[in-house]
């Protein structure tokens, strides 16, 4: 066998179109060649030019060739010449000798337009390279798609309707390049929201929360009618560094079958897994017993280490407390107010015939309003409407006696209660008591920091209500009104002196001829029972029971201008935080001294006097007093932020349930609802879609949504496959089990037969022996 003849590198190969873009000679190795694309050196062996073609056909080289065919030099993109010959023109020809020029053209049309042109020498193609404006246009298109998605969520439009709207853009704006390129079908809208914008906004929120030292978390549950599960919405309240004020944001939702304390705790901790749970300062919730047990279990789980900080507590939602107390007070009477108002609305609901008869016989087109069985204090206007139309309803019922009276439960209730001459008086008393607490509920529906104002406002509400049924000397003798024993009849006024309200007295005057002394006495007694029960419930569930509720009122401008009370309460508030390991003793001393120094400034009294509870914010007020003195008031600033983020109620969560109803559609998945809530929360924070700044990160998140969507589909498919495999294995095991059980039954049956036969033989032999 003769010696192998290796081929030497031929310099002429560097001039060939197929090789010039990537081929390079190797210094000191005449029998080898180098590919600058693959960064590899290969031997020419005895193949010669065929070695180059063989390398060009390799998988790695072809992938790089396709990639480079879609890439352009930045300088070329910025060139003023629209038509250029690209530096990588030789690469446009497919390195595969078996691939035609037409195939090479098709493989590059996604990013390059190729015009055939006759050139001197080898075949060369001139390339129409895209200008930099093409990429800027693409970014503008993505920005437009994001804005349309945000508008869809803000307006609570369906994704199908939003996709149809996009189809009109090309007709509405034929001269707009952006409108022509927008592609937003229903599926893309869905994954853009679920896998693009919502995760982006949520991650920013998580980052903001984790940058804080303390957060307050609120939760409440409601039925999700689409999923038929309990939906527990979770909000976070923290000090936002961006705008230097308290911010409340929707965080996520958990879905539950059962709502025991253990279920709530498990869902709660799982939903907050992205946050540092040790910085949890307070949990805001309403006051059912299951929530009380949940709070106790959570507190124990967070205090596993003696040095761990503890949750602070100012009680459950003050709004729920007042509402439930009012409900209990009315229920303590025998008036059936709720039954009457509910039935009055029902008899005319969805019944055109009755509404027509009512209008005909009474001459009125004013109908009852719907009774709210959840928020009783919102029924003030419902009671007012009922009082106004009672004469018309009476005329309607009297006219029906000549015809057939509807045989319904609601109609019978209304007919029966209308015979009560004190009905109007009872409704007026209902309104009178509701009017005492309505301003409190209206004021504390706000998201701005209100916890320091809670103590004085709630004390005022209780004092106003109980002064109508409690002796004045008892109220004056008590240091705080919530400490009065409303259950002791010795502290209550005689029923003759109970304040019923002017409207109630006027209503009684109009029906006085139909009443006797006993009727009036019983009515007054029940009014006092109502007020007494209301006061007891407020004491039992009120935030006033908790020490910190009173002590943080040192930040209430009305209290802050009274030095003696202010100084005592700031000291006790700091003491509670130290005991709960939310602040060190040294920092508490510094914060106390700094607070005293701030209160001595000339600006302090002026700022407190100008404060408006309706229009101003407590966080803005107190930050203005320490602004520019960060080095001198660092501990005080930290203390103020802890107190001001404390939640005064669950109004934001209650409003969230209304948003849920707007977002819900048939067959909606849980992650879709959560995504829409997160996006809607961001839009609400900004004020409107037009105010949102579309950042580069947001655009990248939107562009990566498709990839995440595909990953989610693959993950679901994998989980489905695993589930199917597990089910198949389970079926096999079940069949084997059934077969074994069948064999067991056969063996037992055969054994029983054998046993019976042997018993007969034994019995026969025993007879023969006898």
Image (spheres, helix red, strand yellow):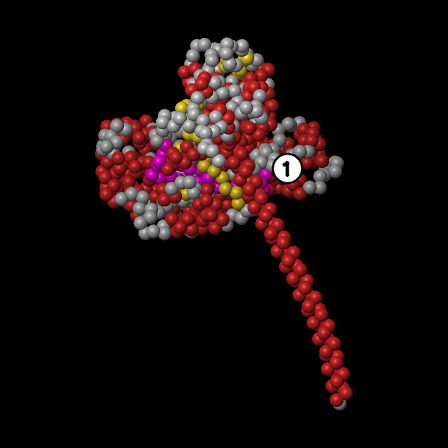
> Which residue is pictured at 68% across the width and 69% down the height?
748
Front-most of residues 127 and 744: 127
Q: Is residue 576 magenta?
A: no
Residue 62: x %, y % from top left: 50, 27
**Prevailing secondary structure class for the magenta stretch in the rendered image:** strand
Q: Nearer the viewer, residue 517 or 331?
A: 331
Please give the range of residues in magenta. Answer: 211-240
Which element carries disc 1, helix, strand or loop?
Answer: helix
> Mark 1 highlights which residue?
346
The answer to whether residue 9 is seen in the rendering is: yes
Q: In the image, is 713 to the left or to the right of 459?
A: right
Q: Residue extending furthest bottom?
A: 770
The residue sitting at 46% across, 44% down in the picture is: 270
Residue located 44% across and 45% down the image: 269
Q: Position of residue 626 (x, y in %)?
A: 27, 31
Q: Residues within 10 Å of mark 1 (few under 14, many from 20)?
A: some
Q: Is 654 situated left or right of 458 in this image? A: right
Provide residue 753's location: percent of width, then percent of height.
73, 72
Could you say where residue 420 lies in the image, as x and y percent from the top left? 61, 41
Instruction: Determine the image quadrant of residue 97.
Output: top right
Q: Is residue 680 visible?
A: no
- Above-or-below relation of 522 to 648: below
């Amino acid at each position: 066998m003769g010696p192998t003849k290796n081929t030497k590198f031929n310099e002429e190969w560097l001039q060939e179109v197929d090789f010039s873009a990537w081929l390079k000679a190797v210094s000191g190795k005449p029998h080898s060649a180098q590919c600058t694309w693959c960064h590899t050196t290969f031997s020419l062996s005895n193949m010669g030019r065929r070695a180059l073609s063989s390398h060009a056909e390799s998988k790695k080289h072809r992938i790089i060739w396709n990639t480079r065919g879609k890439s352009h030099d930045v300088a070329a993109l910025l060139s003023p010449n629209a038509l250029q010959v690209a530096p990588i023109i030789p690469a446009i020809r497919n390195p595969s000798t078996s691939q035609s020029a037409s195939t090479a053209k098709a493989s590059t049309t996604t990013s390059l337009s190729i015009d055939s042109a006759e050139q001197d020498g080898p075949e060369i193609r001139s390339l129409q390279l895209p200008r930099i404006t093409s990429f800027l246009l693409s970014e503008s298109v993505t920005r437009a798609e994001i804005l349309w998605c945000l508008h869809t969520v803000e307006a609570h439009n369906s994704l199908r309707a939003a996709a149809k709207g996009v189809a009109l853009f090309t007709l509405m704006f034929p001269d707009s390049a952006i409108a022509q390129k927008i592609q937003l079908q229903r599926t893309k809208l869905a994954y853009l929201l679920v896998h693009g914008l919502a995760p982006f906004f949520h991650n920013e929120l998580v980052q903001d929360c984790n940058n804080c030292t303390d957060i307050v978390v609120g939760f409440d549950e409601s039925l999700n009618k689409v999923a038929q599960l309990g939906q527990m919405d979770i909000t976070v309240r923290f000090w936002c560094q961006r705008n230097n004020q308290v911010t409340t944001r929707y965080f996520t939702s958990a879905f539950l079958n059962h709502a025991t304390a253990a279920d709530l705790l498990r869902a709660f901790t799982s939903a907050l897994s992205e946050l540092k749970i040790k910085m949890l300062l307070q949990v805001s919730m309403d006051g059912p017993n299951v929530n009380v047990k949940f709070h106790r279990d959570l507190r124990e789980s967070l205090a596993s280490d003696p040095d761990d900080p503890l949750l602070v507590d100012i009680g459950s939602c003050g709004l729920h407390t007042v509402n439930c107390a009012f409900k209990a007070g009315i229920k303590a009477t025998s008036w059936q107010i709720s039954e009457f108002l509910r039935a009055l609305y029902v008899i005319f609901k969805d019944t055109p015939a009755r509404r027509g008869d009512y209008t005909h016989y009474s001459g009125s087109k004013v109908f009852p309003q719907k009774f709210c069985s959840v928020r009783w204090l919102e029924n003030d206007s419902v009671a007012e409407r009922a009082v106004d139309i009672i004469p018309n309803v009476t005329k309607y019922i009297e006219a029906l006696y000549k015809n057939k009276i509807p045989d319904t439960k609601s109609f019978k209730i209304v007919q029966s209660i209308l015979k009560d001459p004190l009905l109007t008086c009872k409704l007026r008393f209902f309104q009178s008591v509701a009017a005492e607490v309505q301003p409190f509920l209206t004021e504390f529906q706000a998201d701005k920091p209100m916890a320091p104002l809670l103590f004085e406002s709630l004390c005022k509400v209780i004092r106003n209500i109980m002064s109508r049924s409690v002796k004045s000397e008892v109220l004056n003798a008590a240091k705080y009104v919530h400490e009065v024993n409303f259950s002791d009849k010795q502290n209550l006024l005689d029923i003759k002196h109970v304040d019923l309200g002017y409207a109630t007295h006027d209503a009684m005057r109009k029906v006085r001829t139909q009443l006797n002394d006993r009727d009036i006495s019983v009515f007054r007694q029940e009014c006092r029972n109502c007020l007494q029960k209301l006061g007891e419930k407020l004491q039992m569930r009120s935030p006033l029971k908790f020490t910190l509720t009173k002590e943080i009122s040192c930040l209430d401008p009305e209290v802050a201008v009274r030095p003696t009370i202010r100084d005592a309460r700031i000291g006790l508030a700091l003491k509670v935080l130290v005991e709960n390991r939310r602040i060190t003793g040294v920092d508490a001393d510094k914060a106390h001294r700094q607070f005293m120094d701030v209160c001595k400034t000339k600006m302090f009294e002026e700022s407190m006097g100008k404060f408006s509870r309706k229009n101003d914010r407590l966080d803005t007020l107190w930050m203005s007093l320490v602004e520019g003195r960060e080095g001198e008031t660092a501990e005080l600033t930290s203390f103020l932020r802890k107190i001001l983020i404390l939640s005064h109620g669950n109004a934001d969560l209650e409003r969230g349930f209304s948003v849920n109803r707007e977002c819900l559609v048939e067959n909606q998945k849980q992650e879709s609802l959560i995504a829409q809530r997160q996006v809607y929360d961001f839009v609400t924070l900004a004020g409107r879609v037009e105010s949102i700044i579309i950042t580069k990160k947001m655009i990248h998140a939107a562009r990566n949504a498709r990839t995440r969507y595909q990953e989610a589909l693959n993950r679901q498919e994998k989980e489905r496959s695993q589930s199917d495999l597990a089910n198949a294995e389970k079926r096999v095991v079940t069949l084997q089990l059934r077969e074994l059980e069948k064999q067991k039954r056969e063996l037992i049956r055969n054994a029983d037969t054998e046993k019976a036969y042997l018993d007969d033989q034994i019995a026969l032999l025993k007879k023969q022996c006898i």
